[in-house]
Amino acid sequence: MRITAGRREDDFEINVIPLIDVMLTLLMFFVMTTTFVQHSSMKVTLPEASATEQTREERNLVILVDVDGRYYIDNNEVLNPGIETLKEAILRVAGDDRTRPVILRADAKSQHQAVITAMDALGQLGFDRLSLATTPSKAEGSE
């Protein structure tokens, strides 16, 4: 009688290596094909407007004014709220391209003067393609 410590022929095992390979391949596929939406890191409540116009997403310069009147240019805070500092920060980000579209995202409860200061700085620098970001207003009677 022969006693062996080896495996019996009726034992089987499940090989999970191919399953892991398939799962990693699917994960890589989904990561590579997912579109990432860049959301602003600052939470701003935009004012409402009844007319909406869609703009193309081309290398827009985004200037954000929060409720306290602080300025953010492409998610980088401008430390001094003065117009000269704002103009320098805009020039640093935009460079010499004055035809670049600018989107001004101001909080609905921000000071009117902060929005006008940003618009004045853009006008002094020669930017003429300015858009104000708004949210669609609620339909009348749907309250």
Image (cartoon, grey):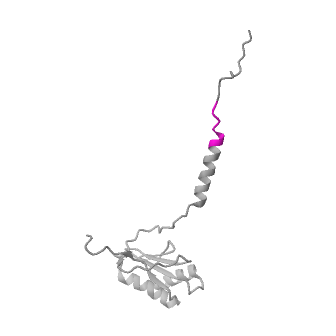
**In-image side of 93 versus 47 (left or right):** right
Task: Point out the image quarter for the N terminus.
Answer: top right
Residue 29 lies, with reference to residue 118, above or below; the image says above
Residue 141 lies, with reference to residue 2, above or below; the image says below
Number of numbered discs on residues: 0
Residue 46 image offset from top left, x and y in percent:
38, 74
**In-image side of 5 versus 143 (left or right):** right
**In-image side of 51 versus 60 (left or right):** left
Residue 78 lies, with reference to residue 30, above or below; the image says below
Q: Which residue sits at x=53%, y=78%?
A: 60
Residue extending farthest to the front is 10
Residue 34 vs residue 68, the one in the foreground: 34
Residue extending farthest to the top is 1
Q: Which residue sits at x=51%, y=84%?
A: 87
Residue 16 lies in the magenta-colored region: yes
Residue 47 lies in the magenta-colored region: no
Residue 108 vs residue 53, the one in the foreground: 53
Residue 3 image offset from top left, x and y in percent:
72, 13
Q: Which residue sits at x=47%, y=79%?
A: 103
Residue 24 image offset from top left, x and y in percent:
62, 49
The range drawn in magenta is 13-19
Residue 108 image offset from top left, x and y in percent:
35, 76
Q: Which residue sits at x=62%, y=43%?
A: 20
State the image quarter where residue 142 is shown. bottom left
Task: Point out the image quarter for the C terminus.
Answer: bottom left
